Structures are given as structure tokens and as C-alpha cells.
Image: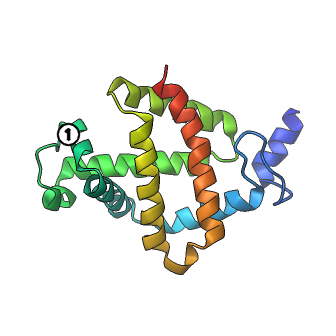
Amino acid sequence: MEYLYFWRKFWGHSNDDVVDSVTGLTGREIKLVQSTWAIVRKDPVASGIAIMSGFFKHYPEYQAFFPAFKDIPHKDLPENKKFQAHALNVVTALNSTVDALTDVGLLEATLISLGERHGRRGQTTQQFLHLKQVVIDVLRQSLGNKFTQEAENAWIKTIDAAYSYIFKGLSS
């Protein structure tokens, strides 16, 4: 079993059509998520700002959960360093998720911990579900025609798999 794990980790999925029993993603979907994310992660602060600005634009009531910038007008958030720092944290969490797609144990440990931290702050599954749509929208805008229907489907499956762990952490 360790031998198989080593080769899977080293070479990735040998068959792009094999579905991972834990994440539900095929090797092809993992590669698609990783390749599209590689484009977005090149400018992590700007990508994070786009995600968090979109989140607060659609759900302004959620800004109150962030004491460091809860009273900053929406239009001024992108220039606020504390907001930028949190935006970078969001991209870092997405980086960790995308990077760990072929290591389910690491994915699980990382995301359960993230869920526990957010649960202690009172965040809910509904807030994460709202964030999911914002992330998909930002990917669509950032990637343009590279964000195909296949890429969108792969991303939705990826976020759903990640949320299964985050939600475990939220509820603990």
C-alpha cells in the first residue's frame, strides 16, 4: 500500500479517468484545477482582494465578522493592509487545498483545522457556501475562456470536497 501511495504521490494519477474515492475527483479534474489555479495564484493579493471584495459586495453583513476592517467602507477595503493580509490568507488556504489534492490526509488535516478556527469565530456553513459562489465567479472572471464548463465542474467538486472537511472542523 505504501508503495502505491509513493507512486501516486510521485507521478500523480496514472489514469486521468480514475476517480479518487475520497475527493470524487479524477486525475484529469485535479490537473485542470491545478493548472487553472496556477494562473490565478500568480498574483495572490489581487486574487484574494477580488474574492473578499466580491464576498462583501454580495454579503455586506459578513464584513462585521472581521474586527480589523469591519468599519472600513467597501470602496476603501482594497487599500487596507489588514484586509489585504486576510485576502492573502484566503488565497493561501486555496493554495494549500489545491496543492494537497493528491494527498487526502494532508488535505483533511489542513481543512479540518481551518474549519475549527472559523468555527471558534462563529462562522457558519452558509457563509462558506456563499463564499463558494464568489470564488467560482472570481475564477470565471480571472480565467475568461480558460474557465470552461469542465473547469467549473472540477472546481465545484474540489470546493465541495474541501468543504466536507471544513464543515467537520466547524462542527467540532
Q: Is residue 156 above or below residue 171?
A: below
Estimate how packed mark 1 is, as few (under 14), some (14 to 19) or many (20 or more) residues with alpha carbons within 10 Å: few
Give coordinates of residue 93: x percent, y percent.
46, 45
- Left or right: where does residue 151 sit relative to residue 5? left
- Judging from the image, the colouring scheme is rainbow
- Left or right: where does residue 19 sit relative to residue 74? right
**Res. 41 in view:** no
The residue nearer to you, when weighing 16 against 85, is 16
Q: Is residue 38 above or below residue 162?
A: below
The image quadrant where one finds the N terminus is top right
Give coordinates of residue 85: x percent, y percent.
28, 48
Give coordinates of residue 19: x percent, y percent.
80, 50
- Residue at the image point whose x is 36% and y is 23% from the top: 120
Q: Is residue 4 above or below residue 72?
A: above
- Residue at the image point whose x is 27% and y is 52% from the top: 56
Give coordinates of residue 171: x percent, y percent.
48, 23
The residue nearer to you, when weighing 137 against 89, is 137
In what element is the residue under mark 1?
helix
The residue nearer to you, when weighing 153 against 110, is 153
- Residue at the image point whose x is 36% and y is 57% from the top: 51
Q: Which residue is mark 1?
A: 64
In the current view of this chain or complex, which residue is farthest to the bottom? 145
Q: Count numbered badges in the picture.
A: 1
**Res. 38 in view:** yes
- Left or right: where does residue 42 sit relative to residue 148? left
- Residue at the image point whose x is 84% and y is 53% from the top: 18
Q: Amino acid at mark 1?
A: Ala
- Left or right: where does residue 142 sit relative to residue 52? right
Q: Is residue 138 above or below residue 95?
A: below
- Residue 69 sits in quarter: top left
